[in-house]
Amino acid sequence: MSPETITQSSPAASGAAPEEILEPPVVFDVRDLDVYYGEFLAVRDVNLEVHQHEITAFIGPSGCGKSTVLRCFDRMNDLIDTARVEGQILYHGVDLYDPRIDPVEVRKRIGMVFQKPNPFPKSIYDNIAFGPRLAGFKGNLDEVVEQALRSAALWDEVRDRLKKSAMGLSGGQQQRLCIARAIAVQPEVILMDEPCSALDPIATARIEDLMQELKSEYTIVIVTHNMQQAARVSDRTAFFTTEVNSESDTRTGVLVEYDSTDKIFSAPADERTENYVTGRFG
Amino acid sequence: MDLMHDDVERLLLEATTSRSRKVKNRLASIWMFGSLCVAVVPLALVIGFVLFKGVGQLSLAWFTEDLPAVSRKAGGGMGPAIVGTILITLGAALMAIPLGILGAIYLHEYGGRGRFARIVRFMADVMTGVPSIVMGLFIYTVWTLAFGLNGFGGSLALGCLMLPIIIRSTEEMLRLVPDELRQGSYALGNRKWRTIVTVVLPAAFGGITSGVMIAIARAAGETAPLVFTIGAARNLNLNIFDGPMTALSVQIFGNAQTPFDAAQSRAWGAALTLVGIVFLMTILARVVSSRVARRHAA
């Protein structure tokens, strides 16, 4: 890790300022993370901290590794045979890539919403009840379903057709259903991988409002192509970019800068960040 | 460079009203419609002939009585053959469906591009093309010579015919289940086997059912493998593990070869009964899979 590559204000470094209020607790502490697909180094030297009840946004051009890093947080990269991770991701101090860790248990605590809404071809009710049933939930399932749908601001639209197929919902409704489905298993963290890229502006606005409401109970990490979205919703922003490897003609993602969203968009420390957020690049 | 109204109009009109294009369009339409008609003719004729020639045989006795001792005389029924076809095909289905579906799940969800999976997939493709008479000979060698003529030998032969069809069609249906659904399930903390049981198989259910029904229908009509393995019984035999049986396809084959009117009519009757059984099963499968599909998707 070269100091000129990554300019980062860790709480320890910037915490000296007297007006700074106490930082919320750290949920994820990423240390020297490298991710390989086979021999190919997809992203390298990522160091950042995700704080509780905040929205952390990952931005950057295509191929910069922001989704790859996100997918390390719930070990979804394990599903790709060739994927390999070096470094540490500490979740409340526990290394998620410790060999003793069961990735399935990780995913029960860390939910994920995908780029393309992916409701199961089942009823709306069964989609939400899927996770709780899996966990062997014994109790009033109707209440859980209603609560999850209310939290995802979808209840009023679907309360009369819970037994109808989820495939009949609009794209925006399907995405909120997927958020409700993730909420129903009561995770601590919700990861969102470009959750609005398949949605129209109105549906996008609703999801963004929803994220603000969910923030008080959940920690959210969102990957987005949309800089305005990051600026609107997030508390902290990580800017990734790609570097061309000199010997092979491949590109590796790097974390350029990670700071409060205000700072990233108004006074970035790195020139590459400034070029990106002002639209001169990417 | 401005385009004048007239120029634009000429350009646009030319493209849509060109005479030769209209003629070509008409010819192509006639050709396709004609091909469809030609393709439907043999199908309609077969069903029409079977109905016309076979319907006279149907009666209560046809379904309940044993085969006549002498096939050249009228009388008797087709009971043992109807029961035989149903039992032997059922036996084959009970072996081939679970094996085939589990095999396909292994191939698509676990084996993937591995060497073993590729070999199995290739062998299944080859097996689909093996003539049924070869399968009959094989079972004759490994089963019938050791255990004698019985219905189970027929079930084994038909099961071997069904297996590759079920494996390949089920794998194809599993491939159609979007990977996003599997990922959505994993992201909720669902394990792999449970993802397959709770998400993948329900999503593929309709397609798997149709594939299975095609395999069953194909097997129910097979003659060659049964000729070697089940023998020729005239009386009802409900035990597929002991003693000769008979089946509709075998009865069609045997009776149609004789020069006697009564036997030939019997062959038509057996043909109609077989078509009827396959038809009923197809409808049943459609109803079941559409009901499941409605519960999941509509």
Image: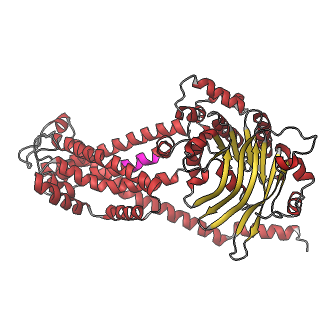
Q: Specify whether A68 is left or right of B269.
A: right
Count of residue discs: 0
Q: Residue furthest left?
A: B69
Residue A221, placed above or below residue A249: above
Q: Specify whether B62 is left or right of A62.
A: left
Residue B282: x %, y % from top left: 37, 44
Magenta stretch mostly in which secondary structure? Answer: helix
A83 or B216: which is nearer to us? A83
Q: Specify whether B188 is left or right of B227.
A: right
Q: Specify whether A8 is left or right of B224.
A: right
Residue A118: x %, y % from top left: 62, 45
- Asked whether residue B134 is in view, the answer is yes
A105 or A232: which is nearer to us? A105
- Asked whether residue A170 is in view, the answer is no
Residue B63: x %, y % from top left: 19, 37
State the extent of the magenta-drawn residues as a range.
Answer: B206-212
User: Residue A209: which quarter of the image?
Assistant: top right
